[in-house]
Amino acid sequence: MRLVSFRLAGVSRTAKPNAARRSERSRQAVLTAARELVPELGYARVTIEAIAARAGVGKQTIYRWWPSKGAVILDSILALSEGEQGVRLPDTGELAADLRAVMRATVAEFADPVFEAPLRALTIEIAADPDLAAMYRERLAGPVDEAKKERLRSAQRAGQLRPDADLDLVLEVLYAPLQQRWLRRSGPLTDDYADALVDLTLRAFAP
Amino acid sequence: MRLVSFRLAGVSRTAKPNAARRSERSRQAVLTAARELVPELGYARVTIEAIAARAGVGKQTIYRWWPSKGAVILDSILALSEGEQGVRLPDTGELAADLRAVMRATVAEFADPVFEAPLRALTIEIAADPDLAAMYRERLAGPVDEAKKERLRSAQRAGQLRPDADLDLVLEVLYAPLQQRWLRRSGPLTDDYADALVDLTLRAFAP
Amino acid sequence: MRLVSFRLAGVSRTAKPNAARRSERSRQAVLTAARELVPELGYARVTIEAIAARAGVGKQTIYRWWPSKGAVILDSILALSEGEQGVRLPDTGELAADLRAVMRATVAEFADPVFEAPLRALTIEIAADPDLAAMYRERLAGPVDEAKKERLRSAQRAGQLRPDADLDLVLEVLYAPLQQRWLRRSGPLTDDYADALVDLTLRAFAP
Amino acid sequence: MRLVSFRLAGVSRTAKPNAARRSERSRQAVLTAARELVPELGYARVTIEAIAARAGVGKQTIYRWWPSKGAVILDSILALSEGEQGVRLPDTGELAADLRAVMRATVAEFADPVFEAPLRALTIEIAADPDLAAMYRERLAGPVDEAKKERLRSAQRAGQLRPDADLDLVLEVLYAPLQQRWLRRSGPLTDDYADALVDLTLRAFAP
DNA sequence: CAGTAAGCGAGACGGTACGTCCGGTCTTCGC
DNA sequence: GCGAAGACCGGACGTACCGTCTCGCTTACTG
């Protein structure tokens, strides 16, 4: 799978590298360097050269294994949850309370610069690069969304949500306003705001 | 006062240029070039040098009048509606129908590359640049949102919307899902989708 | 003339730079930096980047005005005699003495690292690059050889040299052994050796 | 002794490889590849990587057995005459005729790109690298010059050459002008030119 | 209504980063 | 245990743009 995307993304690379001989040490160093530099410098000022220098790695090693700077950032974020088992949302039986908790946690993440900076960087790259957007959906958004939808299905079985509700749409109504405020800095991100989004969503999709 | 500006003359960006002597010809050429180049090359490959070359303008002329590439893009979009009087939404008395029309029009805009490409470029720049985000809110988003809220207030008076509804939140629920799908290319943008957003919003904020 | 050779040497440069606006300051800085760096680092370790850095000049400024590193070296050597009027050899009337003086001076030059290092660098580049060889002949070797031949012609008129002697050949017999010893380090360069070359040359071309 | 070499094993270039186990196959492949690539690409574009790839050999195999690229070139030229017994010049008793034949043969060699390109490459490397120059003198120039001097000694015995002539100097006067013309491309290499060099040399060193 | 100062097109400049290439070293396999 | 294969760190290459800076030229205000 990886190799295919390389072939599509790479411009002139014809002979694909042998992944079995890849240096795990270098890989970790690059991802760590990327994660550190983004909040330090701001994404726009993070360069491949800076990542390579900080990681103590040749530039070629980055170009060999990642198709773009955005892909490095995506990997650096994915690496944080490496080794964890699948995501799972709280399920106390009380949908409203569970969603408020999750939404408030999201608000808190956006307030923490260590999360916020790489996330904003990634979001910008995704908006600009369809290939990266596909990688993002497949490897990060997809699994997380699936976990969220699992919780919603449980709520449907419990009669707390309209049984014919389009769960993708439910997620969008919950998250898109929050993420848009964050991305555009168009308003404050507070717990009250999180709660309001949960309330209106439940109203809109009440059985 | 005179002497101070004399003394500072030559220091970068302290003595701002005399707008009265600005060449309208050059301004239009730059905005047109920017608008044309973004869909042609893709935003990432549009450079100040390319805009200047296409416009037949010196680079300094761009640096003199715009603070950033994003500002040029913003202006190039604003210039499209230059001369028009204030925005105004349809008001047939039937809120659902009016909103569906507006949302479907937005969907159509996103499908047209001539609108889509500069809009995406602008959105990316806004996400990366807080200063530009402020300009955007003040000069583009603000007036448009005010017009939309005016229509919603009319609906509140007509008893078609909860009188205590937070109109900013209503707008976010309507638009953020649509714009996020577009920005992330995370799903199809259809008229049905636009209608679904209108329906759930009206449900959530029904009186 | 210069522009033509640029066009031939440059790979992708189509729009030739405007020589009238060239910065004399930068030109001098580059030539001085090159002259200093060659003996310091040895020619093989002198890079365009190092010259640019030492000169406090952008790399592009070098690439804009010189087709190759060798051309910079050639210019840096030519710049030494810039402003001087044409070369002229001593003419005491005694050919043997005059030639010995000139040959011994050449031997001394080869012993001085400040001359030797750039000269060796240039000689190597000339051997590898026919374009540069042409520049060298035209701008450096040509005028110098002409001055030497002028002295030989004077000797012919004085009956000290065979009147039908091929003067280019005379110069080669004088200088080529010396320069080859130097280039290949195949033997000692002494005043006696210089004298021996003069003696045998005069024997070979005696009237 | 054993322990020392054990301890140093792995330290770069201290423990030299066991020449007995050297692969003759690889050695030949490298030398052939080098000889082929120099005329094909021009010396400046011949890289160790290209030689290794063409030879079907790992880069390390080259670095293990040769100290520099120039040494590979030198070996590739030496390999041509491998197996031949010592060089020997024609001796018809007529020095002038014999020298003309040899000089004309040299002119012909310089005209053949298959000889010319590696020879030029080697000459350049020798000029830049004193270590290689020493190897060159010992393994290539030395034996050849000795053979030439043997012929000259025979001529001295036959009274065709001044008995006290410095034979190294004689060789230089014969060859240096020719080789310098070739290296600098400063004039045509013809049979007449070869003959002229022989004539003037015999005049200069006539008994 | 001439003189002058600004904006202008043009583009050279000092820089930074790009993405590629290669040098020389090190590691992993297979023979 | 050598050798092929090739990943690795390092660093220079030549190019593309950045944002600043002259340079003449044109154009509009000012004295």
Image (cartoon, coloured by chain):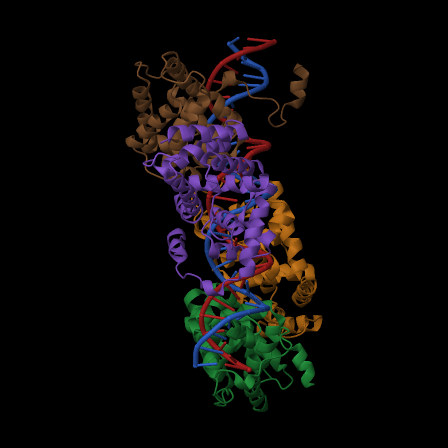
Chain colours: A purple, B brown, C orange, D green, E blue, F red
- Judging depth in this view, the residue of A61 and D109 nearest the camera is A61
Quadrant of image for the N terminus of chain D: bottom right
Which residue is painted at 42% across and 30% down in the image? Answer: A201
Which residue is painted at 30% across and 23% down in the image? Answer: B101
- Judging depth in this view, the residue of C7 and C154 nearest the camera is C7
Position of residue D135 measured from the top left corner of the image (x, y, whole percent): 59, 77
Q: Vertical placement of C192 versus E31: above or below?
A: above
Q: Vertical placement of A191 versus A125: above or below?
A: above
Q: Vertical placement of B94 versus C138: above or below?
A: above
Position of residue D134 measured from the top left corner of the image (x, y, whole percent): 61, 76
- Judging depth in this view, the residue of B11 and A79 nearest the camera is A79
How many marks overall?
Answer: 0
Quadrant of image for the C terminus of chain D: bottom right
User: Is residue D68 in sight in this rendering?
Assistant: yes
Which residue is painted at 57% across and 78% down in the image? Answer: D171
Q: Vertical placement of B169 versus D129: above or below?
A: above
Q: Quadrant of residue B188?
A: top left
User: Is residue B180 in sight in this rendering?
Assistant: no
- Judging depth in this view, the residue of A141 and C197 nearest the camera is A141
In the displayed structure, does residue B101 sit left or right of residue A196?
left
Q: Quadrant of residue A172?
A: top left
Position of residue A81 measured from the top left corner of the image (x, y, whole percent): 52, 50
Position of residue B60 measured from the top left corner of the image (x, y, whole percent): 51, 30
